[in-house]
Amino acid sequence: MKTFKHWRKQELVDTFGLRQKRQCDDLDDWLNSDEDISENTKRELVRLQQELRERVYDWNEQELIVEFIALLLHQVRYKSDVYKTFANRKLNAEIDGHLVSGEVDWMLASGEHEPKAPYFCLHEYKKDKGVDNDPLGQLIIAMVVAQAINENTNTIYGAYVSGRYWYFLTLKNQEYCVSESYTATRDDDIFTIFKILKKLKGIIEEMATEAV
């Protein structure tokens, strides 16, 4: 069984025939968010941004999660009767004869106590010197496993964070798209990242409700 951390983009192409597209309607719709941000939330986002600017070079992976990513996600307020948030939960599936398993850093999925149908996977990544990993490949294979678990043609949503940089993805069937980077230390980007994450609430709510 091959775990998520050992998959690379080229292997996904060779093994599952995945194709990267330059333009995906689902990703474009997701990124073009006009969600509102309250003044209180704006102040908190600015506070988090300033902390990130000062500490991003010093934080290790867990510190980045605890001191920034988790607090940002908390501001979005992911609360729903049809999906829950899960962290460091294992997903596994057999895909075209290949057993694939691994932990997802954070996800939105149906299920009361354990994840059942995953809709969104977030992968946090902070590269250390001498480490040769493929964070995009690791996220995509997690999304492929989520797709297999769901057994439907709905779009799977994802994001990975590399220090101050955020990337958003969609996967539908065998095609995926990756956004340009959003820089959380850049003035307006922190608000854009928040709006994208907030819009995800409605997207996942609709998919989860349809699946019930």
Image: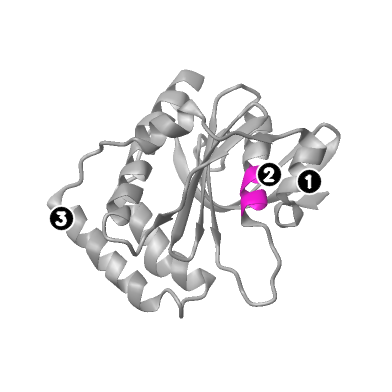
Residue found 63% across the figure and 31% down from its top: 175
**Residue picked out by circle 1:** 11
Identify the disc placed on residue 3: none
Q: Are marks 3 and 1 in contact (CB under 8 Å)?
A: no
Badge 2 crowding class, 10 Å Cα cut-off, few under 14, some 14 to 19, many 20 or more, is many
Is 133 or 188 nearer to us in this picture?
188
Q: Compute the Cα span from label 3 to label 2.
A: 37 Å
Residue 138 covered by magenta stretch:
yes
Q: Is residue 124 above or below residue 2?
A: below
Is 132 or 156 nearer to us in this picture?
132
Secondary structure of the residue carrying tag 1 is helix
Q: Main secondary structure of the magenta part?
A: helix
Colouring scheme, one of rainbow, by chain, secondary structure, one colour: one colour
Q: Nearer the viewer, mark 3 or mark 1?
A: 1
> Which three-letter amino acid code belongs to the residue tagged 3?
Asn
> Which three-letter amino acid code belongs to the residue tagged 2?
Ile
Q: Compute the Cα span from label 3 to label 1.
A: 45 Å
Closer to the chain start, of discs 3 and 1, is 1
**Residue picked out by circle 2:** 141
Point out residue 147 in the picture as x, y percentages from the top left corner.
Answer: 64, 32
Magenta highlight range: 136-142
Residue found 77% across the figure and 35% down from its top: 16
> Which three-letter amino acid code belongs to the residue tagged 1?
Glu
